[in-house]
Structures are given as C-alpha cells and as structure tokens.
Amino acid sequence: MTVARKRKSIVNRGSFRVLGIETSCDETSVAILKISKNSVEILHHEIASQIPVHEIYGGVVPEVAARLHVKETVELLDRAMATHYSLLTTHLPFDVIAVAQGPGLATALRVGIDAARTLAFALEKPIVGVNHLEGHLASAWLVSENRKHWKFPILFLLVSGGHTELVLMKDFCSYRVIGRTRDDAAGEAFDKTGKLIGLSYPAGPQIAKLAENGNPRAFDIPRPMINDPSFDFSFSGLKSAVRRLWEKMPQVVRAKKKTRVDLCASIQEAIVDVLVAKTIAAARKHRPQQLAIVGGVSANHHLQERLRQAVKKELRGVSLLKAARGLHTDNAAMIAAAGAWHFRRGERHDWRKIDAQPEWDL
Amino acid sequence: MRNVTLKHGKDCKRFRVSTENDWGELAEYVAGKLKPGSIVAISGELGAGKTTFVKALVTALGNRRSVVSPTFALMRSYKIAKRGNLKRLLHLDAYRIEHEHELLALDLDEELGDGHTALVIEWPENISKWVKKQVGVTAVIIK
Ligand SMILES: Nc1ncnc2c1ncn2[C@@H]1O[C@H](COP(=O)(O)OP(=O)(O)OP(=O)(O)O)[C@@H](O)[C@H]1O
Ligand SMILES: [Mg+2]
C-alpha cells in the first residue's frame, strides 16, 4: 500500500487514535486519545513526575526538568503499549504520534521527540509535532460539553507558571497572540509573592486557599498595566510592591494569621483583577464567539468565578469554557488532541527532520 | 533606584541605576565585554531587577525580542548578530533548581563550549558549585 493511500484509509475510517508525548519542561506524560466523528475519548493518560506535596493544597512539586525525562518516558510508553496492545489482533494502540516540539527546554523536548521518532521509524507511523501552547488550548476541547459550543473565533486566556497569553483562535490550527506578559507570568506572580510572605513552593494554591478567609481590599497592591490600551500584562512590579509592604511590617503584625489571609486575598485580587480586565477588554475588541481559560492558574476558583461573572455581565451570548479536569497543567492528552487537529488536516512531519523548537511562538 | 556592583577578577565597578528604564548604560558596558564562553552571574533578591537587566542586555546586543522571566522555562536563548563569534546569549534562571544535579538536564557545559555562546544566570547562588568551577565569571550584584 502506498503511503498516500494508507493515510487516507486512517482518516476515512472516521476514527483514529493518537499517541501523545509531552516532555517540554517539568512533566513527563504519555496519553492515547481516540478521535471519532462525534466523540473524543481518552483511552490512556499518565503523568509521571508529579509528587503530591500536601493533600490540603493539592499542589505538586515536579522535579525541575525531570532530570532528563528519559527513564519516565520509556516507562510511560512501555505501560501505554502493554496496556493497550492487543495480542489477538496484533494491532498497535495508535495510528499517529503527536509530540510537543516547543516551546520549552531543548534538552527536555528532545527526549520526547527522540522517543516519537524512534516509534515512527520502527512502527512506520506518521508523526506530528505540536506547539505546547496549542496543546493547552486543546485542553478545553477535551470536554465534550465545550466541543458542542466550539464556535470560532474563541478567545483564550492561557495562564500558567510560565505563560500568560491572550490568544485568538480563528480556526483549528490558526491563532493570533493578541497579548502576553512582558515580564513574569501570572502563576509566577502567585508563587513568588507567596514565597516573599513565607509560604512554601508552590505558593499559588496556598494563596488561593488562605485568600478564602481574607479581605481582598485590606492591602493596596498595584494592578500593573490594567489601564494600558494594549492587551499585554506585567506582573514583576507586584513582587517589589509585596516585598516593600512586607519589609515595612513589624514582626508582630506579620505573625498574625489575619495579616496573612488578608495579604493573600489582596494579592490574588490584584492578579485576578488584571487578568479579568484585560480578557474582557480583548473580548470587547475582538468579539469572540466563546471565551476559554486554560493553563495551571485557570484552576484558581476565584479567577474562574470572577471571569464567569464578568462574561455574564459584559459579553452577551458568550460562555466560558474551561480546561478538562486534571488537564490544567502540562499533560500529554492535550498534546494528542492538538496533534489530532493537525493530523486531520493531513499534516505530518518527517521523522528524520523533526527537531525541538525551544523558542516556538504560537 | 538600584545600586549595582560589577566584579570581574580584580576589577570592581559601581553603577547607580535610577529607574527601571536606566539599565542601558550598564547593559552596554557588559555587552561590550561579552565573548563566547563568557558567564555573567546576576545576584539580587526577589524583584531586585535581574531580569530587567537582562532585558537591557539583550537590547544592547541588538536583539529586539522581548525578554520575559525564565523562571519556569529555566532557560531561554537569544540570537545575537554582528558581534563576531558571539551568536547566542543563554538566559538561565536557577531559582527553581534545588539540587545541582538537575543542571545536568541543561547540557550547560556543552552549550557553552560551542564557541558561539555566552551565558547570563539569575540566582547563581542555587548552582554555586557549578559557577565556582567556571573561570572568568563576571558578577553583577544588584541591591
Ligand atoms: N533601577 C530601578 N529602580 C527601581 N525599580 C526598578 C529598577 N529596575 C527595575 N525595577 C523594578 O523592580 C522590579 C524588578 O523585577 P525583575 O523581575 O526584573 O526582578 P528579578 O530580580 O528578576 O526578580 P526574580 O528574583 O523574581 O527573578 C520590576 O518591577 C522593575 O520595574
Ligand atoms: Mg528574574
């Protein structure tokens, strides 16, 4: 069978399975998705490097760059294959491989890419390189309810430890970044201000937890660039502001539980205010059909709630789409999903040539 | 306002940087000294202005891409043109590095040894063993 006919048969069957591989920074993850005409099913999904730190906060401390991901990648792939390989039919559990190609750490990305190329070569399967950020957007598409409302253009707020971007998705595989952070990401602002006031890493979930009992107006924290006409963000000023506040505070005041919860509430409010204001302003200008929030910080309930209220009040007919449960942070299911978008359009990479693109923009 | 001390071997220079927009002069000075293999270790507390300085440095090196904090990415790379053999600036942030063995994942020695690369580091204290092994490190201390 020629390669062209083989390709056609997979897509024409109406259903295909994607093996996703993600190793772009701290996490190592492998997933298998089954994409059919009217459904998307996660057949298999595993994230290796997450170590739960504290039950209450539900935070995770991934080992930086997961050393080289090699051990985890091999183990995860092995398990995915062993679980889904059918001895009876000798059918491989996937038709195409999707791998995160960038942005990310070159050495980390290459672990996933090398694994993908090896499989592509040995098993004669097509390979699709995926932008990690596009993967985050696809994490919202993995919710079946969201897929029913998937009308373009969709405005995405992508917020995580490493990213703060406003992205307009005009169609599958067609994006425009209309705003981004100029210095620190929103998740970084949470983690670093938390560290300044003595919380342990990762401070983001702890701030959110403590903020529940605090007064968000107790401290005056700046909202950098909130009135700037661009849709860019800046969060580095928050660090300096919180540090000055903290350093001026007498030890007895610092030690009070009330100070802490109020400060957490005030910090969270400042960050959320900026995120909501910019997202709504961008939506007013670009008139998307839907709004979506994805990325690690999008799991923050206060952000979700504030954005939901703002959308209801200010954007008629627009609903707020959220990432699938458990898929806010880096994972391979979202990479497989974005890979499926490209594969459906007939895109493939040559396994001999695909390489990491550490600075890849969306 | 920030007071910056620059140390290279026995040389010691002091700069005063009035506002966040005034890092240019220091950046030009440091950029002028960068060669392939150069390492600049930038120290200072959280929010001192390490990344702000690297922004100015990348601008001084003629790259107009905007520099963002590499804390989560760990490392970013910036292309450099018209500086002879120096073709690339790596921006490493060791803030999240807890054990120096994690550095292995970055292939730093190999990257730096390619004859075209200089390196700037935020939070060099977190990888002090590795930094001490390097020769000719320029220290930038921001207060
Ligand atoms: N010369 C200056 N005078 C006053 N403020 C400054 C000056 N330079 C920078 N700043 C401000 O200080 C903050 C520095 O943030 P930046 O992210 O650069 O710090 P950093 O040292 O990289 O922090 P981190 O430890 O989180 O990496 C910014 O808000 C910036 O506007
Ligand atoms: Mg910094």
Image (spheres, rainbow, N blue to C red):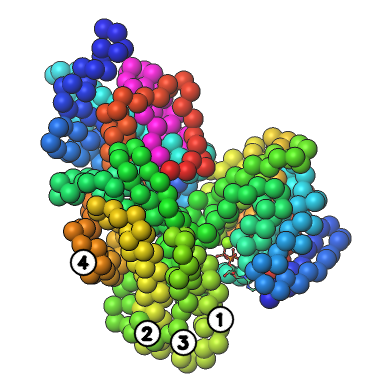
Question: How many marks overall?
Answer: 4
> Who comes first in sequence, dot 2 or dot 3?
2
Image disc number at residue A312: 4
At mark 4, the secondary structure is helix
Q: Is residue A123 magenta?
A: yes
Residue type, numbered disc 1: Arg
Q: Earlier in the sequence, mark 2 or mark 1?
A: 2
Label 1 C-beta lies within 8 Å of the nearest ligand 1 atom:
no
Q: Are marks 2 and 3 on the same chain?
A: yes
- Residue A275 place in picture, x, y as percent: 38, 65
Mark 2 and mark 4 residues within 8 Å of each other at the beta carbon: no
Report how far apart the C-alphas of labels 1 and 4 lie in the structure: 37 Å
Residues in magenta, as a range: A109-132
Given the image, on which type of amino acid does mark 3 rest?
Arg
Badge 3 and badge 4 in a common chain:
yes
**What's the chain of the residue with tag 3?**
A
Q: Which residue is mark 2?
A: A217
To which residue does mark 3 refer?
A: A254
Q: Position of residue A59 (x, y in %)?
A: 34, 62
Q: For the residues marked 2 and 1, what is the alpha-carbon distance in whole angstroms?
A: 17 Å
